Amino acid sequence: MSNIEGLNEVTDIKERKEIIKTYIDEIILEWDESSKQHTIKMSFKLPLIEDSISYKKGSSGRYLRDRKGFKKYEITDGEKELITRYSLCNSFDRHTFSQVAGHIHIAPAEDG
């Protein structure tokens, strides 16, 4: 898979599991009873969160090129951990739960 945005298009469960195993090291789901809030912590194998690429420019303002004609660039590593908090006002509210569930994909354990 060459395009990270295309990963959302994968529907086959076996392919999804392979993608998760490739990029994700750990997923932790926590519940805070006092705030009625879920926290999802995802640890990635690579620093993919908020990473960036910047192309090098010369003194004339034109992009610098390598011997093959490609633009020279620098990659800035991102973070390896993503923490997302979801507050559920009413856990029986199906609409609210479906909005949260749309952001979460839980894979079975490796042994089953």
Image: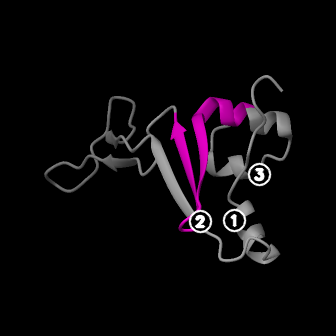
Please identify, in this view, whether the residue under mark 3 or under mark 1 is nearer the observer: 1
Q: Secondary structure at mark 2?
A: strand
Q: CA distance from mark 3 to mark 2?
A: 24 Å
Counting residues from the N terminus, which is met first, the one under dot 2 or under dot 1? 2
Give the residue type at disc 1: Val
Name the quarter where the C terminus is drawn: top right
x then y, percent, for residue 111: 79, 22
Graded by Cα atoms within 10 Å as few (under 14), some (14 to 19) or many (20 or more), the crowding at tag 2 reads some
| Residue 89 location (% of width, % of height) | 65, 77
The residue to which callout 2 is attached is 86
- At a point 60% along the width and 41% down the height, the residue shown is 27
Between residue 33 and residue 58, name the one nearer to us. 33
Name which residue lies at 32% across and 49% down.
54
Q: Position of residue 36 (x, y in %)?
A: 60, 67
* Magenta span of residues: 18-44
State the quadrant of the N terminus.
top right
